[in-house]
Amino acid sequence: MSNPLRVSFVAEGPTDYVVLRAAVRALLGGADFEPVPLKPELDESLRTKSASGWGGVYFWCRQTVEQTGGPASGNLLFASDDALVVIQVDADIARRSYADYEIKDAPNDDLPCGQPCPPPSATTDALRAVMLGWLNETAVLPHAVLCTPSKNIETWVLVGLFPENEQAVKENIECRWGLDVQLRKYGLIKGSQKLIDEYRANEEGIRNAWPEIRAKCTEAERFSQDFLALVPAT
């Protein structure tokens, strides 16, 4: 690549962006790249300037479709050989409905879509189909990587940074609810608020722990393989 790889992120929130940025740094093995947060819009301190949450990802997808007047694959965002787009929603939205976000014009009535777990892929496969519907697509777009942590991305953070935690050592970690609560013990979450400064302070730790996260979490492994398959050869 003559220029650094451009990796754009469409994520539920700023802390998700930090985790994904750390993962990409790990996967690229120190190679330079340009991270670009598309959604939510963030200021220099990674505070949100626009709506976040899974609804924000939904509306970004629909806006991308509207801009092309057809499937999202027609958007130039997905056309560059030196650019990738990571689109993330946590698998816990599989038990939600569009009405929860006051969405009235969804292209399909496909939420909730949760399935018994294990395996986590039963739900994440269904959720990925939902995400493709938001983009008016039936297959993953060129230069795009879908990311669906089960049940949420905090599972990755917990097993990566705090592998000895009493919940992190249990079987079927990706099928367990409420693991984000464990991060309150370590100061990354206060009440229901994820603390962006604490996530940033632990970004290097997440990067270094990425091999262990991949080994423990099948969705982290799937994301890693999908991402690396699209990285242009140097």
Image (tube, grey):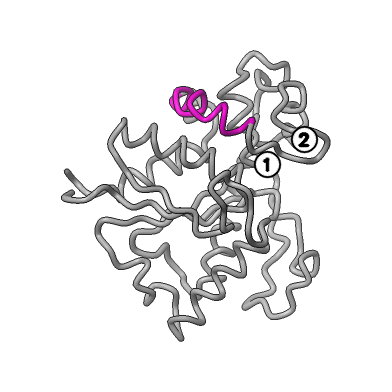
Point out residue 209 in the picture as x, y percentages from the top left corner.
Answer: 48, 23
Q: Residues within 10 Å of mark 2 (few under 14, many from 20)?
A: few
Check disc 2 and report the residue beneath it: 178
Q: Is residue 199 magenta?
A: yes
Q: Nearer the viewer, residue 111 or 102?
A: 102
- Left or right of 67 on screen, residue 155: right
Q: Nearer the viewer, residue 104 or 67?
A: 67
Cα distance, mark 1 to mark 2? 15 Å
Point out residue 32 in the picture as x, y percentages from the top left corner.
Answer: 29, 39
Magenta stretch in the rendered image: 198-211
Q: Is residue 105 above or below residue 2?
A: below
Point out residue 3 in the picture as x, y percentages from the top left corner.
Answer: 21, 50
Figure quadrant of the C terminus = top left
Disc assigned to residue 117: 1
Q: Nearer the viewer, residue 62 or 178?
A: 62
Q: Is residue 185 above or below residue 17?
A: above
Q: Is residue 143 magenta?
A: no
> Among all residues in the image, which is located at the extreme front?
44
